[in-house]
Amino acid sequence: MVYLSTRLFLRPSYVVLGLALLTAVPAHAADNSAAASEERLRKDVFYLASDELEGRGPTTKGIDKAADYIAAEFKKAGLRPGGGDGTYFQPFPYPANVLDEPARLTLRGPKGQEIVLKQGDQFNPMGLGRAGKLTALVVFAGYGITSVAAKYDDYDGIDATDKVVVVLRDAPHCANNEETAARLKAAASFTRKMANAEKHKAAAVLFVNDAETARGDDDLLDFNFTALGRIAQESNRPAFHVHRSVLQTMLTATGAADLADLERRIDKDLEPQSKELIGWTAGLEVKAHKGALTLKNVIGVLEGAGPLAKETVVVGAHYDHLGYGGAGGSLVKTIKKPIIHPGADDNASGSAAVMELARRSGAAPDRIGRRVVFMAFSGEEIGLEGSKYYCEHPLFPLEETAAMFNLDMVGRLRPDEKSHKENVLVEGAGTGKNFADLIDAVNRKYDFNLSKRSETLPANSDHFSFYKKRIPVLFFWTGNHSDYHKPTDTADKVNVAGMRKVVDLSADVVSALATEAKRPEYQAVKVSSAKRSDGPTLRVMPNYTDDGDGLLLDGVADDGPAAKAGLKAGDRIVEVAGAPVKNITTYMEAMSAQKRGETIEVAVMRDGKRKSIKVKLDP
């Protein structure tokens, strides 16, 4: 499932296809026993969630291995290639900074010493930086933070103009003042520090791990860790990540205190320890360009037969996850080092379920009914990118797409606390006329506790892309858990027997969707949102593909502060409570400074005109 990292909506989400009540046609029995089905599911999940696949992050080699694996299983199941050029793949672009060649970083000291640093050993260029070549004096700017709210400024007393600024990661650790610590933390992101350096006219930024991050191993971040999306492409300065030993060498040569001592002084009294590193210059060069990462959906087709053959039912799940945590969405507090997020439940489980459904459907003899298109989407975790791309570039006409069935996080089936029956969460039950009745009719055979919701949460999984195109959708999942979006979402925790039961139920639902004579009738439902637990929110739906300044809205939650104040789809938020909004990151930063229950002014561009709107935040 997607966690909208700055993200404005927490999961889960529920959307279910609307169908006229029909007599459920049982899916063709699996060609093997339940035990054999479970063994296939176990194999799929353990492979997709293995270290070899690197968390299936968008910049990893592992995500391509996952795509190849799924395509091979679709082929074995008898599905024809549904992508372009006779392949199972539908490639699509996602904005990213691209490193053209190894970068260069050379330091020259006050005694004429020259240190040529080696990329990968002593430094790495960072994907959030811009290309550039320069030689400049070096200044140490503490944590690189300026916070009026916290009355703290690392740039006070130093001149960073046209200089290379060295800053520590994270923020000062003031344990005795939680409010000040929170305010400093709010200004501690890479993007905030880059923006602050630019504000102080720095020429480039060298990031150094703070002592806590470097504990155990002073790891360097790979270029791609910060290279994705619009946010990575907005800085106008080169950025590098260098080892603490590099900074320590410069401090020692200038007679300054030990780096660890400087950090302790800052933490103790919140007194900046910034200083010019007299006599040191840095020569650097990085060649990179604004480009695009190529992601790909995996698509296999089971052709229809009979009078319904031209219509399509889409059965989908996303196969991407968070990689090493840098793709966004990791819920590990203050994650600062690359660590594999296996994504066994989210969403190796759903991908495995789709492959198993493909095997069963492909083995069914003499089937009659709608075409069934099996899809494994990429880019879900960075904003439903794969499903949105398909819906904008459909390989089968959307007007002839009868329904979309989505499986996301189906690996943690467990009993309901009240009924003690195994609980399957169903979203979208209201998106198709009589869908709820259909699901109940199919479930009589299985006796799950079905937690049905007619409405849907926006942008929480790939079914929403289809719902926006007025296609009835169903979404099955088995609930959230404490391992969600963490490195602890491992394959050994997946309830494989439970997955097989969900697949059994899903097979009958898909069979019904594919064979009922009357096409499901779309119904619009309320689109709601979940509140953030860590601060106020306007409860809006951002457009993640827009590249203009501000935050373009795809929509607003019906019952949220934005809707109540009159904001609407198409508005572009450009200011929140006096703070300029350039993108989703600055929007979230501006919102994090607000208090629940307050009334704030939000400036939007609407029809080419600036409009100021007063918004009362939820208490």
Image (cartoon, rainbow, N blue to C red):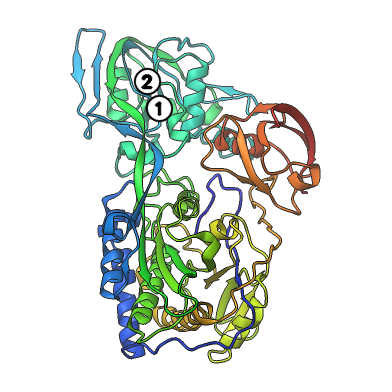
Q: Which residue is depicted at the point 46% across and 57% down?
A: 485
Q: Which residue is depicted at the point 40% across and 52% down?
A: 322
Amino acid at the residue labelled 1: Asp
Q: Which residue is mark 1?
A: 261
Q: Is residue 415 above or below residue 270?
A: below
Q: Which residue is depicted at the point 71% across and 61% down?
A: 526
Image coordinates of residue 128 in percent, x first then y, are 40, 31
The reply to whether the C-beta atoms of the residues labelled 1 and 2 are less than 8 Å apart is yes
Q: Is residue 565 above or below residue 547?
A: below
Q: Is residue 166 above or below residue 463?
A: above
Q: Is residue 338 above or below residue 478?
A: above
Amino acid at the residue labelled 2: Ala
Which mark, residue 519? none
Image coordinates of residue 491 in percent, x first then y, are 36, 69
Q: What whole-number distance in Å separates the C-alpha atoms at marks 1 and 2?
A: 6 Å
Is residue 348 at least partly visible in the picture? Answer: yes
Using the rendered view, name the quadrant where residue 81 is placed.
bottom left
562 vs 546, nearest the viewer: 546
Q: Which residue is depicted at the point 54% across and 83% down?
A: 422
Q: Secondary structure at mark 2?
A: loop
Which mark, residue 257? 2
Image coordinates of residue 583 in percent, x first then y, are 56, 34
